[in-house]
Image: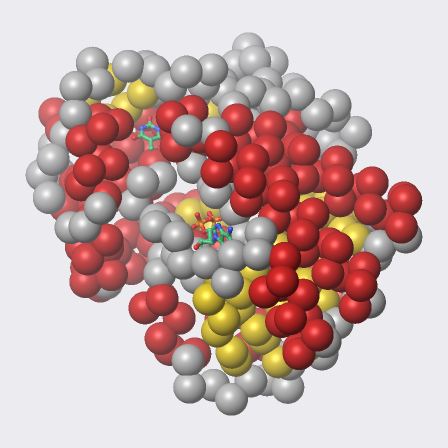
Amino acid sequence: MRIIVTGGAGFIGSNFIFHMLKKYPKYRIVCLDKLTYAGNFSTLKSVMDNPNFRFVKLDICDRAGVFALFKEEKPDIVVNFAAESHVDRSIEDPGVFLQTNIIGTATLMDACRSFGIKRYHQVSTDEVYGDLPLDRPDLFFTEQTPIHTSSPYSSSKASADLLVLAYHRTYGLPVSISRCSNNYGPYHFPEKLIPLMIANALNDKPLPVYGKGENVRDWLYVEDHCKAIDLIIHKGRIGEVYNVGGHNEMKNIDIVKLICKELGKPESLITYVANRKGHDMRYAIDPTKIHNELGWLPETKFADGIKKTIQWYLDNRNWWEEIISGEYQVYYQKMYGDRK
Ligand code: NAD
Ligand code: TDX
């Protein structure tokens, strides 16, 4: 089996590559990644010498480059993780989100149509369903929940999903889509809630909680997401959407307090700052379909996963310290400098 994994130098894509190379030693895995600010070549250093692995620096919007790579590699499966993924950045500057997340997806699927593949898998998000109210804990996102987005990021991901389903219906492209809840774990870029709070707490810096910290996210350990995608590309039905989530809803403020506790840092570091524009209140996935059809269940409990994650950030300070010492400082100043 030959698989092209796009966005494999990012958080979830890299974890997926590690999972696949370990589980399927005979598969050839080609990582296509533009290495944007979020892509990190050093993340992949442990697999660089693996003869079944190849890294190609390429933009998924580069039509000629993508077509040339498909011609050369003749993939059976394409798994598209490549995306601009941070909601706050999409609020500041939507353009690149439309380019990568929508045009890039279409470009990849055009290449799939031209060269023929067994499966194109789109890694999507629960954010395409919009949000749920805090006072209705009985409500969950199912695959039938209407698309109803809030941010430029989620709108670009929803647009891509619609294109994926259209390519299936119109051209018969063998596609599948997974819509996962918030992931956490190793190699998570420190602009996102959990790694940002870990890094700031370790540096005794303020912990910037948006609004009152009441917003709820449904957290899943990244390895469980990778296993779900592995199942879908091998056994999932073509043309289908699968929601992925582990019924682990938590308020942001509780996560931040937990990180303080685990690191032995005072809660006085917590600083309430201006809310995110259009901030989604609650995400909550109903994973019944993937459980019933494919037998998927999350394996890592949050209490264990968060400990493992914090330990990873303690053991891999070089990885994130290098990131936050560069262009990240400009980003941090812009986003948090005088955010009150
Ligand atoms: P990330 O930002 O950590 O990584 C994105 C990767 O894509 C980076 O390596 C980057 O260099 C690459 N990339 C960006 N633009 C590219 C382009 N034009 N061409 C080629 N490569 C490009 O993101 P992530 O958190 O790992 O998310 C991966 C995917 O999963 C995304 O599609 C995201 O929407 C989706 N998702 C993420 C989460 C989450 O909690 N992080 C949850 C559900 C779904
Ligand atoms: O500094 C912060 N303070 C804060 O209160 C940051 C970075 C975040 N937050 C809040 C906003 C959200 O309610 O924490 C929550 C989580 O924020 P993010 O880590 O930015 O994630 P979210 O916006 O929920 O989106 C994530 O999950 C779905 C991923 O970034 C997306 O790519 C994925 O699709």
Res. 145 image quadrant:
top right
Specify the farthest residue to the front: 64
Rendered location of residue 244, percent (x, y):
64, 44
Res. 241 image quadrant:
top right
Q: Is 330 left or right of 285, judged from the image as shown?
A: left
Viewer-closest of 133 and 129: 129
| Number of marks in the rendered image | 0
Rendered location of residue 245, percent (x, y):
60, 42
Rendered location of residue 253, percent (x, y):
32, 25
Where, quadrant-wise, is the C terminus in this rendering?
A: top left
66 is higher (above) or lower (below) than 11: below
323 is higher (above) or lower (below) than 31: above
Residue drawn at x 71%, y 39% is 161
Rendered location of residue 51, percent (x, y):
51, 89
Viewer-closest of 130 and 10: 10
Q: Specify whether residue 73 is in view.
A: yes
Q: Is 329 left or right of 137, judged from the image as shown?
A: left
Specify the farthest residue to the top: 135
Residue drawn at x 79%, y 53% is 175
Specify the farthest residue to the bottom: 51
Res. 277 image quadrant:
top left
332 is higher (above) or lower (below) than 185: above
Residue drawn at x 56%, y 13% is 133
Where, quadrant-wise, is the N terminus in this rendering?
A: bottom right
Residue drawn at x 79%, y 68% is 115
